[in-house]
Image (cartoon, rainbow, N blue to C red):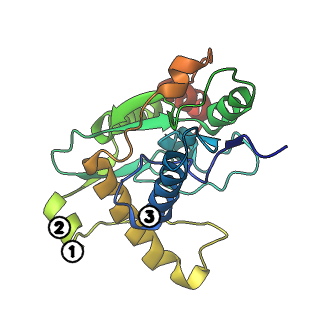
Amino acid sequence: MGVRRFAPSEWAAANQSQIAHYQFKDRTQKYLEEVNQSKEASVIEYCLFQPGFFTNYFAHPYATTQHFAMFGMFVDFEQRRAIIVDNSIAKFTLTTVEDLCATVADALDYGGKWPPIGGMSGSTIDVAGLIALGESIRGGPFQVDRVSLKDVQDNTFSTTWVPMIEHPGVPVAMREAVSRNVLREYLLGIERGAWSVTDEWNRCLNLPYTAAEQYLRKVWANKQ
């Protein structure tokens, strides 16, 4: 029996995000669309599982799941600091790794047809809202670096710190340069709406998706 369903490597932002290191995802989506359009019936059922940002990143350095490489983000709950584009009101999606795993597990047994775009959402928030949540949870103000959108677009922005991408796939010698570039891609992607994903699986499955506030308050409870 051949493969009936296929889940390509997604697990992040929406398609056509213009995020440099995710361009291969768009090529995969285009290929799957073209393959299925070439026949009277779909050749293969597929779904692009898209959770937005993992809420777990904002629990760094405290892991709540195994086999997930964590690193710091533009809102750093541990050091109480953040980086935000001036006047940003762009929303993005937060979903826990645990909820993504539960979604995929239930999707395997789902009796209906998989949605080609399979977004899921624990929470939708903007950077200012996440900073405010962090200040509430951590009990004090965050140091906030503000950058202009134009400077980020021109790659001339400056911040007092950069969240380091401590990932096995990033050589130590390249870590600083890669981290700055990823920060830039994240900030631009948020402003384009690339990290605000849809909620098809919320509507298809009877799962209790965990809100960012619920998850982060639990992780950071009693932490110094």
Q: Is residue 107 above or below residue 164?
A: above
**Label disc, if present, on residue 165 of the rendered structure:** none
Residue drawn at 49 percent across, 27 percent down:
200
Residue most extreme to the right: 1
Evaluate if marks 3 and 2 touch, with contact meaning CB atoms under 8 Å apart: no
Is residue 60 toward the left or the right of residue 159 in the image? right
The residue closer to the viewer here, 152 or 13, is 13
Residue drawn at 59 percent across, 74 percent down:
170
Q: Is residue 95 above or below residue 145?
A: above
Image quarter (top left, top right, bottom left or bottom right) of the N terminus: top right
Distance Cα–Cα, label 3 vs label 1: 23 Å
Q: Is residue 73 above or below residue 4?
A: below
Nearest to the eye among marks 3 and 1: give it.
Answer: 3
Image quarter (top left, top right, bottom left or bottom right) of the C terminus: top right
Residue 110 x %, y %? 69, 23
Evaluate if marks 1 and 2 touch, with contact meaning CB atoms under 8 Å apart: yes
**Label disc, if present, on residue 156 of the rendered structure:** 1
The residue at which mark 2 appears reads as 151
The residue at which mark 3 appears reads as 23
Residue flagged by tag 3: what amino acid is it? Gln
Q: Which is more N-terminal, label 2 or label 3?
A: 3
The residue closer to the viewer here, 206 or 71, is 206
Q: Which is more N-terminal, label 1 or label 3?
A: 3
Question: Badge 2: few (under 14), some or many (20 or more) residues near its Cα, within 10 Å?
Answer: few
Distance Cα–Cα, label 3 vs label 2: 23 Å
Residue 54 x %, y %? 54, 43
Distance Cα–Cα, label 1 vs label 2: 5 Å
